[in-house]
Amino acid sequence: MTTAPTSTAPTPSGPAPTPGSTPPPVRSGRRGVGAPLPLRAAAFLVALVCALPLVVVALKAFEAGAGDAFALVWRPRVGELLGNTVSLVVLTCVISTVLGVGAAWLVERTSLPGASFWRIALVAPLAVPAFVNSFAWSALVPGLEGLAGAVIVTSLSYFPFVFLPVAALLRSLDQGLEDAARALGLGPWRTFARVGLAQVRPALLGGVLLVALHLLAEYGALEMLRFPTFTTAILDQFEVAFDSRSGSVLAVVLMGIAVTVLTLELLARGRARHARVGSGTVRRATRTRLGRATSLALLGLTTLTALAIGVPAWSIGKWLSRADQAMEPANLGPTLWSTLALGLVAAVVTTVATFPAAWLIARSRSWFAVAVERVTYLAASLPGVVVALALITLTIGLVRPLYQTATVLVVAYVILFIPRAMVATRAAIAAVPPELGDAARTLGDRPVRAFLRVQLPLMLRGTMAGFALVFIAVTTELTATLLLAPTGTQTLATAFWDASASLDYAAAAPYAAALVVLSAPLTYLLLHGKNEEPLT
């Protein structure tokens, strides 16, 4: 029996090994391997910036002592706010999951006609801000308010966060696993429930997490629908009662809810790997024939689209028809430009800032990586007004020249919307096998060059989806922009809010229409910014 000769070719990590020795391993980003120090330092810096509002809020809440803080918490009003907030999050997340997963399955896994059209139609609601949607529904149904109104509006506004990632994965999952389940006797419905849903679990959980975090920080839509939550109560304490301490105490309770949500998502996600090397024998999934149920499925998706898009389109159209003399067109130009500039800058900065933490959580999954990710998510659960006031406190006390500058506003956007980029970027990184980087480094590339040449191009399309999500969020952000925008700077969202707050819907209509038109093209990135073949 002969022994294969040992290769003596030099490796990029050192001189040629001696015969019979084991070549030195190439360090990679696989789980269990330590991440480079610069990457960890960058992730720590991002987490530190995101943690600043959390620290300021906690210090402000307990500045009069823990006893007074707990006394403020143990009040009937706080119990009512807690019940409202939890009810809204639970109901909206459940409805968004049903709508998002059901619509994704119909579009990607059945014989439903017009799949390309439905992909666009079911993502389009993201172009309509929730507070614009609430105005539209209030005009259509004047008595719509409270929990029922809030659940309807937020579900129709946020279900695309679930539909988008689930549809992307269902479009290219390996049919082999489902074939095996069918061969074992499972029918199409049980196969999807037991195999398909298990494969899309990471995407589903990421979408539901985004929905929950948005609900915890939502203000405009809930204020219009007269449904009090912790976020609306916090703003009331700051603006009406001028009581920053009580508002900070409420914010700490809100942070506790966010910690619970983040912990549940982390436990449900598990530690399974979601990448493989090569495409193997992946085959396009066989579509389930709907037969007589086709008409019912088309009716359901048509109704959902009409409620999510048709109602706000009708309302904005009605306002525009009365807006001929409500405002001069010149007022719209500077507002549109400032919105576009802030959106682009904030989206680029947020996407870049997301990479270190997303890389760590997708590759190493160490306690450090998890802590960094959780801190960014926790900070994003704070209402915009709380983040804005914390940054005002810090800039006035420490770096006064930055007070009321665009730099501070962009930092606020990064803190508030980094989870949007994190979910997309983390999924894009996880879908690229780390062995590709190993191979590039074995062939002589240094780590940075290997990343730029081999891995980044494969991640770029998924990352652009996160960019689009952040851009849409920035253009529609309200409370932080009202407080932090430099003097004379106005965005489409704040201009719409100012006009609608005085019940001048005709003057608000052009701004609402501009918000939709500006956000609509970004749905292309959301639809085509995913990897064509997510690896599971």
Image (cartoon, rainbow, N blue to C red):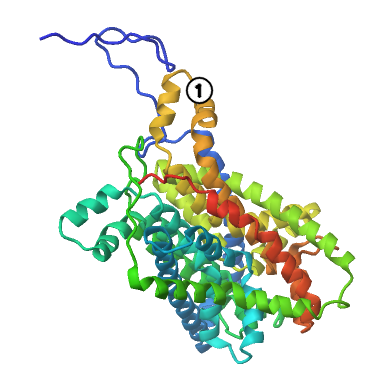
Q: Position of residue 242 (x, y in %)?
A: 71, 79
Q: Disc 1 on helix, strand or loop?
A: loop
Circle 1 residues within 10 Å: few <14, some 14–19, many ≥20: some
Q: Nearer the viewer, residue 203 or 59?
A: 203
State the residue at coordinates (71%, 82%). Answer: 240
Q: What type is the residue that disc 1 sits on?
A: Arg
Residue 222 lies, with reference to residue 461, above or below; the image says: below
- How many discs appear? 1
Residue closest to the far front: 292
State the residue at coordinates (77%, 84%). Answer: 503
Residue closest to the far bottom: 143
Residue 81 lies, with reference to residue 459, above or below; the image says: below
Q: Which residue is mark 1?
A: 446
Give residue 317's quadrant in the image: bottom right
Left or right? Give the position of 227 relative to 423. right
Residue 22 shows in the view: yes
Residue 252 shows in the view: no
Q: Position of residue 248 (x, y in %)?
A: 60, 72
Give residue 323's quadrant in the image: bottom right
Q: Position of residue 388 (x, y in %)?
A: 68, 64
Residue 6 lies, with reference to residue 122, above or below; the image says: above
Q: Nearer the viewer, residue 65 or 476?
A: 476
